[in-house]
Amino acid sequence: MIRIFIAVFMLFNCIMIGQVSSSETQKQIDQTVWKPFQKAYEALDAVSLNAIYADEVLRVTPEGIDTKNVFKSKNVERLKASKESNTQIKLDFWFDSRHTNDDTSYEVGFYKIGITADSKTQYLYGQFHIVLKKINGIWKITQDWDTTTINGKPITKEDFEKKNSLRF
């Protein structure tokens, strides 16, 4: 009986240590990836935004698959054009699920992008699936998939408002 208790106790401690470690890792990811990502996106800073990605990235959107990092040059063009037109961007997001170990994290969530131009704001909503890998001690985005529809239905304000946006 005492052996069973000790085995259960040790298993419980291992589970708790793993959960604390995962939680701490996700906090680290928030501060080193997601906070800078949001800041760079809103500042229209393509250089800082692209630096958050790994050298080799699988990027998937409804338009197709990019394995050549074309999206990075598109980030530069798009954010430069936004600056030149005095467009402001506000990015909000939250996580639906996160699975993290010591060197890999798979994160799914919803985003809202507010684009303000000529005193009018338009909102875009979507879902993302991101894979992060720790490369040379630094968390980097290695896979980035997003969509504006689920099962053929557009993602809406109501979908986004199911949870509160993250605040860093």
Image: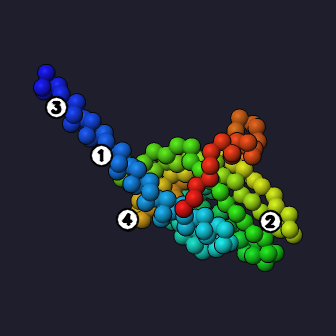
At 65% from the left and 57% from the top, the residue drawn is 92
> Circle 2 is placed at which residue position?
116
Q: At label 3, which amino acid type do we have?
A: Ile
Q: Which residue is mark 1?
A: 17
Q: Residues within 10 Å of mark 3 (few under 14, many from 20)?
A: few
For the residue pair 69 and 2, the one nearer the viewer reads as 2
Indicate whether 108 appears above or below 51: above
Query: What x and y, as percent, mark residue 5?
Result: 18, 28
Q: Quadrant of residue 47?
A: bottom right
Q: Is 15 displayed left or right of 34 in the figure?
A: left
Q: Identify the element where label 4 is drawn.
A: loop
- Judging by the rendered image, the residue that carries numbered circle 4 is 137
Q: Nearer the viewer, residue 48 or 42?
A: 42
Q: Residue under circle 3?
A: 6
Is residue 153 positioned above or below 4 on the image? below
Q: Earlier in the sequence, mark 3 or mark 2?
A: 3
- The amino acid at mark 2 is Thr
Earlier-in-chain disc, 2 versus 4: 2
Q: Secondary structure at mark 1?
A: helix
Q: How far from the left and from the top, in percent, is residue 140?
A: 48, 61
> Label 1 amino acid?
Ile
Q: Residue drawn at (43%, 60%), measured in percent from left and top?
A: 28
Mark 2–mark 4 contact, CB under 8 Å?
no
Q: Nearer the viewer, mark 4 or mark 1?
A: 1
> Rounded to the nearest whole Å, what is the CA distance between mark 4 and mark 1?
21 Å
User: Do tag 2 and tag 1 residues touch (Cβ < 8 Å)?
Assistant: no
Check disc 4 and give the amino acid type.
Answer: Gly
Quick check: 37 above or below 96? below
State the image coordinates of residue 158 (x, y, percent, origin top left).
73, 42
> Which residue occupies 52% across, 48% down?
107
Q: CA distance from mark 3 to mark 2?
A: 60 Å
Local SS, label 2: strand
